């Protein structure tokens, strides 16, 4: 997996006031932690983060660029990010240091490829899960796992156990959950006007017995 480089520096000061000052400088507060280190308070370039990380799908390795020895060349994963609900600006990020020699578990997105045979018959392709948990070395984290749905007919499904993970990657699951299925067509009920009971005449309508024309009245006296 290609690594993303990101500028990072140690920050001083905590609290809302210090965070606002950082953001006015175009930076965002963050924390850096791991199994073999204490949590460090750091700052990142907010614009660079949005350009390089925001649109990434799944779990990606990030390598810090820094003049601080304790941060330089450290490889991390983004564990959590907070964004402004209106502007979309990054407000805070959590970075987790990874050991490149130790396996870890991450979520990997699924990409559904092909056109299901059941869709051609009017069925609806219904993804149930969009990602799965895998275990592998950090360098083996796949960007995504492809799921071929072309052979699915109506009511068919792909389960977790059906996945073909890349070499060195193990899909982690406890139950054989459904990932994607093809639903039957949705038939819209057509409502028709109820017919009148047989033999009943519409109000005011003539029947064969009553439809006889009265004889013309003769004008004048005899």
Image (cartoon, helix red, strand yellow):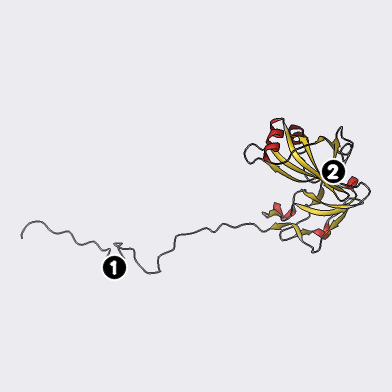
Residue 170: x and y in percent read 88, 55
Q: Which residue is mark 1?
A: 209
Residue 218 circle label: none
Q: Is residue 21 above or below residue 206?
A: above
Residue 76 circle label: 2
Q: Earlier in the sequence, mark 2 or mark 1?
A: 2
Q: Is residue 16 left or right of residue 172?
A: left
Query: Which residue occupies the extreme front position in the image?
Result: 13
Name the residue rendered at 71%, 59% in the picture: 154
Residue 141: x and y in percent read 86, 47
Quadrant in which the C terminus appears: bottom left
Badge 1: few (under 14), some or many (20 or more) residues near its Cα, within 10 Å? Answer: few
Figure label count: 2
Picture quadrant where residue 43 is located: top right
Quick one: SS at disc 1?
loop
Quick one: SS at disc 2?
strand
Name the residue rendered at 87%, 52% in the picture: 104
Q: Is residue 106 above or below residue 41?
A: below
Q: Is residue 17 above or below residue 161?
A: above
Distance CA(mark 2)–CA(mark 1): 94 Å
């Amino acid at each position: 997996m290609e690594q993303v480089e990101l500028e990072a520096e140690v920050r001083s000061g905590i609290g809302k006031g210090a965070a606002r000052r950082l953001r006015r400088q175009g930076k965002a507060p963050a924390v850096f932690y791991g199994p073999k280190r204490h949590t460090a308070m750091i700052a990142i370039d907010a614009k660079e983060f949005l350009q390089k990380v925001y649109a990434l799908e799944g779990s990606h390795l990030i390598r810090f660029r820094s003049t601080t020895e304790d941060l330089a060349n450290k490889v991390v994963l983004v564990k959590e990010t907070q964004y402004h609900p209106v502007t979309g600006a990054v407000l805070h990020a959590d970075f987790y240091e990874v050991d490149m020699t130790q396996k870890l578990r991450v979520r990997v997105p699924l990409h559904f490829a092909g056109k299901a045979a059941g869709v051609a018959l009017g069925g609806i392709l219904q993804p149930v899960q969009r990602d799965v948990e895998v275990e592998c070395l950090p360098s083996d984290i796949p960007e995504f796992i492809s799921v071929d749905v072309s052979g699915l007919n109506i009511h068919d499904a792909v389960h977790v156990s059906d996945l073909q993970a890349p070499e060195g990657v193990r899909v982690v699951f406890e139950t054989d959950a459904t990932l994607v299925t093809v639903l039957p067509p949705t038939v819209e009920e057509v409502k028709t006007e109820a017919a009148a009971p047989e033999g009943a005449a519409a109000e005011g309508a003539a029947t064969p017995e009553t439809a006889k024309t009265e004889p013309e009245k003769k004008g004048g006296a005899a």
